[in-house]
Amino acid sequence: MDILNPAFMQRALLAALLVGITAPAIGIYLVQRRQALMGDGIGHVALTGVGLGFLLNTSPVWVATAVCVVGAVVMELIRSSGKTRGDIALAMLFYGGMAGGVMLMHLSGGSNANLISYLFGSITTVAEEDILAICVLAAFVILTTVGLRKQLFAICQDEEFARVTGLPVRLLNLLVAVTAALTVTVAMRVVGLLLVSALMVIPVAASQAIARSFATTFALAVTIGVLVTVSGTATSYYVDVPSGATIVLLAIGVFLTLTALAAPLARKRARHAADSEKHCTLDVPGTPADDVRVEA
């Protein structure tokens, strides 16, 4: 297990483990709300935070966290307003965030290597201060997505019904947006800002192919996330390939495998259900008149 000897690999594997848990955990709610690409938009905005962190000579992770939270709240407010020009406002926010990040990175004197490491992830660049930030943010994401799963599931399925039952729908919607923003900053050092959305969506889509309940889908998606992030990080160490791209390609491979297994699994479940119905069928007893015997 020489992979555990270098300190940077210990940090990278811990970060990969946390990313594997948090990205699908919030991704399942985004997929339910048909906002699968929200993580991609937040990733664009996060680049401005990274560039600002370099310009101010402070932690890019914490600055990116603050910028991501503001961007996610603005996205949620635009979505909830329901204005017809909302898509244009979101496009301006996404591309403005990307352009602002590149400009700030240039003004700070940062190299293209730094920019690429944040865009596509790099296991060798996970520093000790990054680990502290990743652990704190991941703890918040896990507590929110698990502790409030019933409330978040309710608003993702039917906002009007959730509002009637007395749930604070607007506050919960903002909480989902903020949690997604924090997940982006957790994952950007391992997967990269341009690929983090894939890790939010693909494990969830793969688990939905075979799972039949929300709890099973949640657990399976997190399991897939952990498997692909840890194995992808280990593969990138041994083969010397980009960690973010390796993780996403492994996730796509799992998705294709489970999708291929979905049809035969569905037929097996249907046969099992049919057999169960046969065994549960009660024999209809004869009517009392059938048992009446007339003595001569």
Image (tube, rainbow, N blue to C red):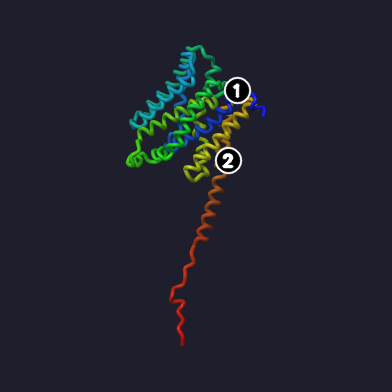
Q: Position of residue 131 (x, y in %)?
A: 53, 24
Give the camera-side residue of 279 and 248: 279
In three-dimensional space, the C-alpha distance between marks 1 and 2, rounded to whole angstroms, equals 32 Å
Q: Secondary structure at mark 1?
A: helix
Q: Give the amino acid type for the residue marked by disc 2 in the picture.
A: Thr
Q: Which residue is mark 1?
A: 8
- Is there a contact, CB below 8 Å, between mark 1 and mark 2? no
Q: Give the amino acid type for the residue marked by disc 1 in the picture.
A: Phe
Residue 266 placement, left or right of 97 = right
**Which quadrant is home to the N terminus?**
top right
Of mark 1 and mark 2, the one earlier in the sequence is 1
The image quarter containing residue 245 is top right
Q: Which residue is mark 2?
A: 257
Q: Position of residue 17 (x, y in %)?
A: 55, 31
Q: Position of residue 41 (x, y in %)?
A: 44, 27
Frontmost of labels 1 and 2 is 1
